[in-house]
Image (cartoon, rainbow, N blue to C red):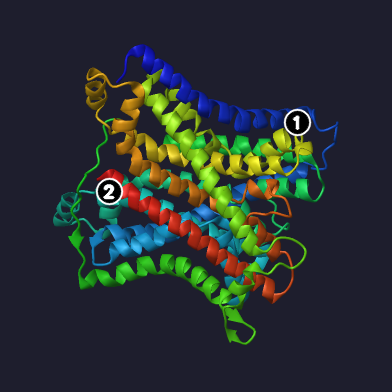
Amino acid sequence: MFKNASRGTVAAFAAAVPVAFLAVFFVWPLLVTARSAIDGAGIAGQDTTISVRALGVAAITTLGLASAGTGLTLIIGLPAVWALNRRRWRGSRLVAALLTAPFVLPTVVVALAFLTVRRDVMPFLGAWHGIPAIIAALAFFNVAVVLRTVGPALSSLDERLVAAAQTLGASPRHVTMRIIWPAVRRAVGGASAVTFLFCSTSFGLVLVLGGTRVQTLETAAYIELTAFLDLRGAAIIALIQACLIVLVTIVTSRLTRRPVGSTTQTSPVRIAATRKNSFGIIAGLSPAVVLVAVPMVTLVIRSLTGAHGATFASYRALWQGDGAGASLGQSIVTSLWLAVVAAVVASTIGVCATAAAALDPRARWVRAATVGPLAVSSVVVGVALLIGLAVPLRSWGQSTTVVLLIAAQALVATPLVVRVLAPALDAIDPRQYAAAATLGASPFKVVVHVIAPRMRAAITSAIGLAFAVAVGEFGASVFLARPGSPTLPTAIVRLLSKPGADNIAAASAGAVVLALLAGTAMIVADMTRKEVRR
């Protein structure tokens, strides 16, 4: 690409940006949190109020909810995968897009949608402190994981094998167990592991739907900080949660690793559906469609309903403060500019990390290191930033909170940014770099005239994706946002803690606005991602 000396220098400068960012806002806070959890240093010798029994109950609740959510996701998702991928029928792509869209919704939006369903449509979801609603919400989020993971494996199945087995007299059960199941078994295992990982980090859903009565590890950490001001207890819980997520991540990576020598059919040919298949397709899709459609429709209706019928009063009231803090409208503005800055920061870090890895193979570890925040939950990130930086720097005032909020949102978004940018950069023909260098172009000119034009669409997609993630981020922001200037997700949750139908309607309106912001950003990101593929 460039001369070796120039390439190494540019790679070093590019790698310094993500390394410095991760060291200050991720590694150091985690180390301080781990040290605080072990010996209590740095928290004025504070004793923790959390007991071993409470930790055990929280861990069991976390694993139990994750297992139940994973099970329900597979029960609903696998029939939908069969209905969408075994036969070709008009409208299947649209239905698949609608079923996968909820995965990008902010957690608070989904939690409020199921809270509305529980109150207005299905009261039984509130049984056992809202645990049925939590499990249903977990499945709502993760059906998209099953569709995107198992769907391609089922679509790539060679139909000639099925036809040959049927010709030889194999029953539908034998065809399923001997041909179809072996083809999708590994994909189902990978989808199960990823779903379990996501379900075990469902802080927003549990907090809104279960309150403080359902204590997972994440909600227990939240209670220790907000109710007891127990920083060391929160640090201990965060450390246990981080270890759990790392363990699940290792298992997930093993289950989702493609076997050596495996191949996937690039252009699968599916048989057109017949009238005979209609009942099976409808039966397979109905649970998933109901699970996705009912909560979102109910949320929108609730936001448009007042004491005397349909009204836009809830949306007009977004900008009316109650005198006790910022209005939801002000929180929208706060969330917008914080998310924009966080998206720019995450994209800058992603560009530097991918560029360093492309310039110098020895710098590939930097790109791999940017995935580190995925190995812990956003709650752990928030607790670590609070203990490692916010408490020691509290005398610096409001500016510290703003910087840490941006850093938290950027940390959560950076791994996704790198995943978008890396394939686009790897797809550029290295011979173009060599040709430009041969013609006398400096490293700067090669970046401006060769790399930048081919990376523009990917960078736009990465910024849109980072914005969608940042604007709906709740797990870390709830620990860092100040009461006077909350982000929109934290403001919605605080509004839900107040009694009154008007507060619920206003929170519903804010959730709809938040969903529109995140959805619009994801549409832009998806459109530019398609341009990258072309």
Q: Mark 1 points at which residue?
A: 36
Q: What residue type is labelled 1?
A: Ser
Q: Position of residue 4 (x, y in %)?
A: 34, 13
Q: Give residue 178's mark.
A: 2
The C terminus lies in which quarter of the figure?
Answer: top left
Q: In this view, does 412 lie above or below 432?
A: below
Q: Is residue 192 visible?
A: no
Point out the tag, 2 or 1, that comes first from the N-terminus. 1
In-image side of 54 versus 532 (left or right):
right
Q: Can residue 59 be seen in this view?
A: yes
Secondary element at tag 2: helix
Q: Position of residue 163 (x, y in %)?
A: 16, 55
Q: Is residue 514 above or below residue 244?
A: below
Query: Residue at image x 65%, y 84%?
Result: 307
Determine the residue positioned at 36% across, 60% down: 97
The relative height of residue 114 versus residue 379 in the rendered view (above or below) is below
Q: Position of residue 304 (x, y in %)?
A: 56, 77
User: Which amino acid, by three-letter code, is at mark 2?
Assistant: Arg
Asked if residue 454 is positioned above or below residue 201 in the image, the reply reads above
Residue farthest along the top direction in this orientation: 5
